[in-house]
Amino acid sequence: MSITALQVKELRDATGVGMMDCKKALAETGGDMEAAVDWLRTRGLAKAAKKAGRVAAEGLVGIVTTGNQGAIVEVNSETDFVARNEQFQAIVGNVAKLALRAEGDVAVLAEMAYPDSGRSVSGELTDAIAKIGENMNLRRSAMLSVSDGVVGSYVHNAVKPGLGKLGILVGLESTGNKEVLAGLGKQIAMHIANTNPQSVSPDDLDPEIVARERAIFVEQAKASGKPDNVVEKMVEGRVRKFYEEVTLLAQTFVIDGETKVADVIKAAEKDAGAPIKLTNFVRYALGEGITK
Protein backbone atom coordinates (compact mmCIF):
# COMPACT_ATOMS: atom_id res chain seq x y z
CA MET A 1 0.00 0.00 0.00
CA SER A 2 1.01 3.64 -0.47
CA ILE A 3 2.17 5.50 2.65
CA THR A 4 1.10 9.15 2.68
CA ALA A 5 3.11 12.10 3.95
CA LEU A 6 0.29 12.79 6.43
CA GLN A 7 0.69 9.31 7.96
CA VAL A 8 4.44 9.79 8.25
CA LYS A 9 3.92 13.17 9.95
CA GLU A 10 1.37 11.71 12.37
CA LEU A 11 3.77 8.92 13.41
CA ARG A 12 6.63 11.37 13.76
CA ASP A 13 4.52 13.68 15.93
CA ALA A 14 3.56 10.72 18.10
CA THR A 15 7.05 9.31 18.54
CA GLY A 16 9.57 12.04 17.72
CA VAL A 17 11.40 9.60 15.43
CA GLY A 18 12.92 10.76 12.11
CA MET A 19 10.82 10.88 8.92
CA MET A 20 12.69 8.11 7.10
CA ASP A 21 12.38 5.69 10.03
CA CYS A 22 8.67 6.53 10.40
CA LYS A 23 8.09 5.87 6.71
CA LYS A 24 9.89 2.54 6.95
CA ALA A 25 7.88 1.54 10.05
CA LEU A 26 4.59 2.28 8.30
CA ALA A 27 5.68 0.37 5.20
CA GLU A 28 6.68 -2.64 7.32
CA THR A 29 3.34 -2.64 9.16
CA GLY A 30 0.99 -1.93 6.26
CA GLY A 31 0.19 1.57 7.48
CA ASP A 32 -1.08 0.45 10.91
CA MET A 33 -0.22 3.34 13.22
CA GLU A 34 -0.16 1.38 16.52
CA ALA A 35 1.83 -1.45 14.97
CA ALA A 36 4.26 1.10 13.51
CA VAL A 37 4.82 2.59 16.99
CA ASP A 38 5.53 -0.90 18.34
CA TRP A 39 7.86 -1.59 15.38
CA LEU A 40 9.86 1.51 16.29
CA ARG A 41 9.87 0.63 20.00
CA THR A 42 11.17 -2.89 19.42
CA ARG A 43 14.13 -1.41 17.56
CA GLY A 44 14.92 1.12 20.26
CA LEU A 45 13.93 4.04 18.06
CA ALA A 46 10.89 5.25 20.00
CA LYS A 47 12.94 4.92 23.19
CA ALA A 48 15.43 7.31 21.66
CA ALA A 49 12.65 9.74 20.84
CA LYS A 50 11.77 10.06 24.54
CA LYS A 51 15.22 11.58 25.08
CA ALA A 52 14.78 14.13 22.29
CA GLY A 53 13.49 16.82 24.64
CA ARG A 54 16.71 16.94 26.65
CA VAL A 55 19.13 19.76 25.93
CA ALA A 56 22.22 18.59 24.04
CA ALA A 57 24.86 21.32 24.26
CA GLU A 58 28.01 19.21 24.58
CA GLY A 59 29.52 17.06 21.83
CA LEU A 60 32.11 17.71 19.17
CA VAL A 61 32.96 19.90 16.20
CA GLY A 62 34.41 17.90 13.29
CA ILE A 63 36.49 19.19 10.38
CA VAL A 64 37.69 17.61 7.13
CA THR A 65 39.79 19.38 4.47
CA THR A 66 40.96 18.17 1.07
CA GLY A 67 43.10 20.81 -0.62
CA ASN A 68 40.75 23.47 -1.93
CA GLN A 69 37.69 22.22 0.01
CA GLY A 70 36.76 21.90 3.65
CA ALA A 71 33.68 20.97 5.67
CA ILE A 72 32.75 21.48 9.30
CA VAL A 73 29.96 19.96 11.41
CA GLU A 74 28.67 20.22 14.96
CA VAL A 75 27.14 17.12 16.52
CA ASN A 76 25.75 17.58 20.01
CA SER A 77 25.37 15.28 23.00
CA GLU A 78 24.03 15.91 26.49
CA THR A 79 27.31 15.37 28.33
CA ASP A 80 31.02 15.71 27.75
CA PHE A 81 31.34 12.08 28.88
CA VAL A 82 29.64 10.95 25.65
CA ALA A 83 31.84 13.32 23.62
CA ARG A 84 34.79 11.24 24.86
CA ASN A 85 33.09 8.02 23.74
CA GLU A 86 34.93 6.39 20.80
CA GLN A 87 31.67 5.43 19.05
CA PHE A 88 30.47 9.04 19.19
CA GLN A 89 33.85 10.34 17.97
CA ALA A 90 33.75 7.91 15.03
CA ILE A 91 30.26 9.10 14.10
CA VAL A 92 31.30 12.78 14.12
CA GLY A 93 34.41 12.00 12.05
CA ASN A 94 32.39 10.08 9.44
CA VAL A 95 29.68 12.74 9.31
CA ALA A 96 32.34 15.42 8.71
CA LYS A 97 33.65 13.43 5.72
CA LEU A 98 30.13 13.13 4.28
CA ALA A 99 29.60 16.88 4.81
CA LEU A 100 31.96 17.63 1.92
CA ARG A 101 29.44 16.01 -0.45
CA ALA A 102 26.46 17.67 1.25
CA GLU A 103 28.02 21.11 0.57
CA GLY A 104 26.93 22.56 3.90
CA ASP A 105 23.26 21.53 3.63
CA VAL A 106 22.49 19.93 6.99
CA ALA A 107 19.14 18.53 5.79
CA VAL A 108 20.84 16.77 2.88
CA LEU A 109 23.60 15.55 5.20
CA ALA A 110 21.09 14.08 7.66
CA GLU A 111 19.57 11.86 4.96
CA MET A 112 22.85 10.72 3.38
CA ALA A 113 23.81 7.04 3.72
CA TYR A 114 26.02 6.45 6.74
CA PRO A 115 28.98 4.17 5.85
CA ASP A 116 28.51 0.40 6.26
CA SER A 117 25.33 0.65 8.34
CA GLY A 118 22.37 0.56 5.95
CA ARG A 119 21.09 3.66 7.77
CA SER A 120 21.04 7.38 7.08
CA VAL A 121 23.13 9.78 9.17
CA SER A 122 20.03 10.67 11.22
CA GLY A 123 19.25 6.96 11.55
CA GLU A 124 22.77 6.25 12.79
CA LEU A 125 22.43 8.97 15.42
CA THR A 126 19.05 7.58 16.48
CA ASP A 127 20.61 4.12 16.81
CA ALA A 128 23.47 5.59 18.88
CA ILE A 129 20.97 7.37 21.15
CA ALA A 130 19.25 4.07 21.88
CA LYS A 131 22.58 2.34 22.63
CA ILE A 132 24.31 5.10 24.58
CA GLY A 133 21.16 6.40 26.28
CA GLU A 134 21.68 10.10 25.67
CA ASN A 135 20.14 12.64 23.31
CA MET A 136 22.30 13.61 20.31
CA ASN A 137 21.68 15.72 17.25
CA LEU A 138 23.32 16.94 14.09
CA ARG A 139 23.07 20.67 14.69
CA ARG A 140 24.77 22.40 11.77
CA SER A 141 27.19 22.07 8.89
CA ALA A 142 29.08 24.32 6.48
CA MET A 143 31.39 23.89 3.53
CA LEU A 144 34.09 26.21 2.22
CA SER A 145 35.82 25.94 -1.16
CA VAL A 146 38.11 27.99 -3.41
CA SER A 147 38.57 27.52 -7.14
CA ASP A 148 42.37 27.50 -6.73
CA GLY A 149 44.22 27.64 -3.44
CA VAL A 150 43.78 26.06 -0.03
CA VAL A 151 41.14 25.76 2.67
CA GLY A 152 43.12 25.90 5.90
CA SER A 153 41.83 24.64 9.24
CA TYR A 154 42.46 24.50 12.96
CA VAL A 155 40.81 22.59 15.81
CA HIS A 156 41.45 23.95 19.28
CA ASN A 157 42.20 21.36 22.00
CA ALA A 158 41.63 18.47 19.59
CA VAL A 159 40.64 15.16 21.19
CA LYS A 160 41.58 13.45 17.91
CA PRO A 161 42.73 14.86 14.55
CA GLY A 162 39.89 17.02 13.21
CA LEU A 163 37.72 16.68 16.33
CA GLY A 164 37.38 19.19 19.17
CA LYS A 165 35.20 21.88 20.71
CA LEU A 166 36.24 24.80 18.52
CA GLY A 167 36.90 24.50 14.79
CA ILE A 168 37.77 26.99 12.04
CA LEU A 169 37.96 26.84 8.25
CA VAL A 170 39.71 29.58 6.21
CA GLY A 171 39.55 29.95 2.42
CA LEU A 172 42.69 31.28 0.68
CA GLU A 173 42.35 31.86 -3.06
CA SER A 174 45.75 31.80 -4.84
CA THR A 175 47.74 30.11 -7.58
CA GLY A 176 50.75 30.18 -5.25
CA ASN A 177 52.68 27.49 -3.37
CA LYS A 178 50.16 25.25 -1.61
CA GLU A 179 52.44 24.44 1.35
CA VAL A 180 52.88 28.14 2.08
CA LEU A 181 49.12 28.66 1.78
CA ALA A 182 48.36 25.73 4.11
CA GLY A 183 50.72 27.09 6.76
CA LEU A 184 49.26 30.58 6.46
CA GLY A 185 45.71 29.18 6.56
CA LYS A 186 46.38 27.35 9.82
CA GLN A 187 47.93 30.43 11.44
CA ILE A 188 44.97 32.61 10.45
CA ALA A 189 42.56 29.92 11.67
CA MET A 190 44.38 29.94 15.03
CA HIS A 191 44.01 33.73 15.10
CA ILE A 192 40.26 33.41 14.41
CA ALA A 193 39.94 30.89 17.24
CA ASN A 194 41.34 33.53 19.59
CA THR A 195 39.60 36.70 18.35
CA ASN A 196 36.21 35.50 16.98
CA PRO A 197 35.84 38.13 14.21
CA GLN A 198 32.35 38.87 12.88
CA SER A 199 33.34 39.21 9.21
CA VAL A 200 36.29 39.28 6.81
CA SER A 201 36.10 43.06 6.19
CA PRO A 202 33.83 46.03 6.91
CA ASP A 203 32.17 45.49 3.51
CA ASP A 204 30.57 42.20 4.61
CA LEU A 205 29.77 43.17 8.18
CA ASP A 206 26.02 43.14 8.96
CA PRO A 207 24.77 46.73 8.34
CA GLU A 208 22.37 46.46 11.30
CA ILE A 209 25.29 45.77 13.65
CA VAL A 210 27.19 48.78 12.30
CA ALA A 211 24.11 51.02 12.58
CA ARG A 212 23.51 49.93 16.18
CA GLU A 213 27.12 50.57 17.19
CA ARG A 214 27.17 53.93 15.40
CA ALA A 215 24.01 55.03 17.24
CA ILE A 216 25.66 54.18 20.57
CA PHE A 217 28.82 56.07 19.60
CA VAL A 218 26.75 59.13 18.57
CA GLU A 219 24.99 59.24 21.96
CA GLN A 220 28.29 58.81 23.80
CA ALA A 221 29.96 61.57 21.77
CA LYS A 222 27.04 63.99 22.20
CA ALA A 223 27.22 63.50 25.96
CA SER A 224 30.69 65.06 25.87
CA GLY A 225 29.11 68.42 25.02
CA LYS A 226 31.53 68.98 22.14
CA PRO A 227 30.50 70.84 18.92
CA ASP A 228 28.80 68.81 16.17
CA ASN A 229 31.87 68.76 13.89
CA VAL A 230 33.98 67.36 16.75
CA VAL A 231 31.25 64.85 17.63
CA GLU A 232 31.25 63.62 14.01
CA LYS A 233 35.01 63.05 14.10
CA MET A 234 34.74 61.26 17.43
CA VAL A 235 32.07 58.93 16.02
CA GLU A 236 34.07 58.13 12.89
CA GLY A 237 37.13 57.37 15.01
CA ARG A 238 35.16 54.98 17.20
CA VAL A 239 33.63 53.27 14.14
CA ARG A 240 37.14 52.71 12.73
CA LYS A 241 38.24 51.24 16.05
CA PHE A 242 35.16 48.99 16.05
CA TYR A 243 36.10 47.69 12.57
CA GLU A 244 39.61 46.94 13.83
CA GLU A 245 38.17 44.90 16.68
CA VAL A 246 35.58 42.82 14.79
CA THR A 247 36.69 42.46 11.15
CA LEU A 248 39.36 39.88 10.42
CA LEU A 249 41.59 41.72 7.95
CA ALA A 250 41.75 44.81 10.19
CA GLN A 251 42.56 42.89 13.39
CA THR A 252 46.06 42.75 14.86
CA PHE A 253 47.54 39.30 14.24
CA VAL A 254 47.65 37.52 17.62
CA ILE A 255 50.75 35.51 16.71
CA ASP A 256 53.03 38.56 16.51
CA GLY A 257 50.83 41.09 18.32
CA GLU A 258 51.61 43.99 15.99
CA THR A 259 50.86 43.30 12.28
CA LYS A 260 47.39 43.62 10.74
CA VAL A 261 46.07 40.34 9.32
CA ALA A 262 45.76 41.99 5.89
CA ASP A 263 49.48 42.84 6.01
CA VAL A 264 50.37 39.30 7.14
CA ILE A 265 48.63 37.96 4.04
CA LYS A 266 50.35 40.54 1.83
CA ALA A 267 53.77 39.59 3.21
CA ALA A 268 53.07 35.88 2.61
CA GLU A 269 52.53 36.53 -1.11
CA LYS A 270 56.30 36.77 -1.59
CA ASP A 271 56.85 33.21 -0.28
CA ALA A 272 53.76 31.90 -2.07
CA GLY A 273 54.84 33.44 -5.36
CA ALA A 274 51.38 34.81 -6.16
CA PRO A 275 48.66 37.14 -4.81
CA ILE A 276 46.51 35.71 -1.98
CA LYS A 277 42.88 36.55 -1.26
CA LEU A 278 41.16 35.49 1.96
CA THR A 279 37.69 34.66 0.65
CA ASN A 280 35.82 33.60 3.79
CA PHE A 281 36.00 31.76 7.09
CA VAL A 282 33.76 29.60 9.27
CA ARG A 283 34.11 29.38 13.05
CA TYR A 284 32.12 26.84 15.08
CA ALA A 285 32.31 26.95 18.87
CA LEU A 286 30.57 23.99 20.46
CA GLY A 287 27.16 24.82 21.92
CA GLU A 288 27.22 28.54 21.10
CA GLY A 289 23.68 29.93 21.01
CA ILE A 290 22.11 26.91 22.75
CA THR A 291 20.05 27.79 25.80
CA LYS A 292 20.98 25.28 28.48
Image: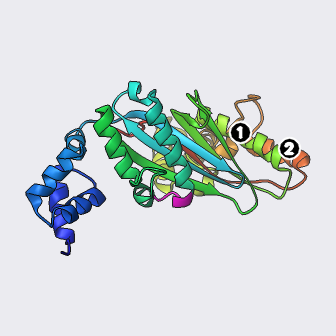
The residue that appears at 69% across and 43% down in the rendered structure is 250
Number of numbered discs on residues: 2
| Residue 26, image quadrant | bottom left
Residue at 19% x, 72% y: name it: 4
Q: Relative to 90, is 148 on the left or the right?
A: right
State the quadrant of the N terminus.
Answer: bottom left
Q: Depth check: give the residue in front, 31 or 271.
A: 31
**Residue 247 visible to an observer of this rendering:** no
The numbered mark, 1 or 2, whose residue comes first in the sequence reads 1
- Label 2: state its secondary structure: helix
Marks 1 and 2 sit apart, C-alpha to C-alpha, by 16 Å
Q: Which residue is mark 2?
A: 267
In this picture, residue 31 sits left or right of residue 18:
left
Q: Residue furthest bottom?
A: 2
Q: Quadrant of the C terminus?
A: top left
Up-down relation of residue 173 to residue 166 (above or below): below
Q: Amino acid at mark 2?
A: Ala
Residue 186, numbered circle? 1
Q: Dot 1 lies on which element?
A: helix
Residue in the image at 43% along x and 41% along y: 75
**Residue in the foreground of this view, choosing between 266 and 32:** 32
Above or below, 107 relative to 156: below
Write down the region rendered in magenta: 101-105
Q: State the image coordinates of residue 86 (x, y, percent, origin top left).
A: 47, 30
User: Residue 2: x, y in percent?
Assistant: 20, 75
Give amino acid for label 1: Lys
The residue carrying pointer 2 sits among few (fewer than 14), some (14 to 19) or many (20 or more) residues within 10 Å by Cα, namely: few
